[in-house]
Image: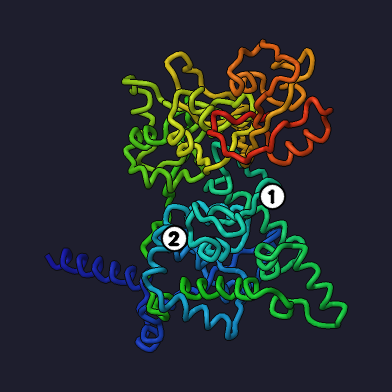
Amino acid sequence: MKLITLTAMALTLWLAGCASTTQPSVPAAVSEAVPAKLPAPGPAVIPAGELTPITAEEAASRGVAQMAPPPDLWERIRRGFRMPNLDGDLVRQQEQWYATRPDYMQRMTERSRKYLFHIVEELERRDMPTELALLPFIESAFNPQAVSSARAAGMWQFMPATGQFFELKQNVFRDDRRDVLASTRAALDYLQKLYGMFGDWHLALAAYNWGEGSVGRAIARNQKAGLGTGYQDLKMPNETRFYVPKLQAVKNIVADPERFRSELPAIGNHPYFQTVTVSRDIDVALAARLADVPLEDFKALNPSQNRPVILAAGTPEILLPWDNATIFQRNFEAYTTGQYASWTAWSAPSTMSVAEAAKRVGMSEADLRSVNTIPPRMLIKAGSVLIVPRTTKNQDDVSGHVADNGQLNLAPEAVLRRTTVKAGKHDTVASIARRYKLNAGQVAEWNNVGASAAFRAGQQVVLFLPSKATSRSVKARPAAARPSAQATTVRKPAKKVAHR
């Protein structure tokens, strides 16, 4: 028994020795020196270029890069701030302006939730500062339907010519200056181009607002005068002078909303929409219904559409909220209750009045004006493309050439003067129509004769001519062709107007 007891005691002591060897006790002084919680890491330092060895001291001084992306998009934007801060009274004024308008800020930031994730993704892909994701706040309050008095359009506010330079199509069916994907691509292309020209983001932004030529000339003037050439050194219009301070003010509010007593809506760090391919022409209203998306929300994601129909050949993709893309595809494939598109394109064969065009396509004049946005007292020029009802005989989708290039060209209606001229020997409806560059059918109608009729020598022939053309034409004709009576100014009904 004693032998067993001694053996057990020896085994216990041996195990205790092993435990004390593998887990040494920590002196009280040392354990108190170890902090209970590590300090928060500083901003991540991501090396650029080729990797090179670092010393132990350098490793200890650097923070640890966070592997998980931030769940909040605002925080992701903050982490990508890289532009130098601008300070001064102009920035303070703009901070005050935005901070004292919480309702405006709330509407603007709520509107941005549909587009911000895509813009931030594109900026990071191009290695550009994420402050630029806030630029549409300044340009358009994130309203893709915004149009300025100078005809700049979309949330990035492209002028027509600049939009064409950056391949933003503008035709009767769509305006890519309003398109979310196309306009963002073009805006970032333009900003990169400007940064490459000036080497400074503040100057690049000034050029985006004022024009690269204007900024270049302002820099040249300052250089000649021996003055500074930074953003704050240049003499510029007030709009441009306030432009970057506005962006800086919004940046400051996003960076620290509590300081300005502002509340930013929660925006998750994930896509809001995805692209869906459209294989057939389809009415905008039907596309929204098949996607189970309110029409207003559908238009907010697809703001480039100018007309009530989406043409597959010109706009092969639409944007839908992430969860609705599958719903649309399933419903689109299952839709068998009617045609996808109730509208198609029609080209005017000659210059004509709106009333005449409406009669040809089987619409009321008011409806044709409304759907094609034709103002009063305008003529439709030859070759113009209009949206008209699709008939059962024509179910073909609109061709790619028309979808990409269709334009609606208008001309003011001319004030016509009723004029009578004497017919010469052997004059016919056709010869007089040629002489005055008129339509033979209308000359016949004005005189209640057939289109192939001949006039007697000296017979009074009624014509309706534009006032300036009347005086020129009368002077150019022999006596037999001159008016026999004083011309009278009249405004004929639209269907009576002859134009070539």
Q: Please name the residue shown 35% across and 78% down the image.
A: 25
Against 289, residue 78 (above or below) is below
Give the x, y percent position of residue 330.
Answer: 35, 28
Against 178, residue 466 (above or below) is above
Against 372, residue 36 (above or below) is below
Give the x, y percent position of residue 41.
Answer: 48, 73
- Between 110 and 452, the residue placed more toward the observer is 452
Q: Please name the residue shown 67% across and 43% down the image.
A: 167
Query: Left or right of 52: which side holds 448?
Result: left
Mark 1 secondary-structure assignment: helix
The mark closer to the camera, 1 or 2, is 1
Image quadrant where residue 285 sits? top left
Q: Residue at the left extreme?
A: 1
Tag shown at residue 161: 1
Residue 211 seen: yes
Tag shown at residue 73: 2
Query: Left or right of 147: which side holds 53?
Result: right
Find the distance from the CA under tag 1 to the CA under tag 2.
34 Å
Which residue type does callout 2 highlight?
Leu
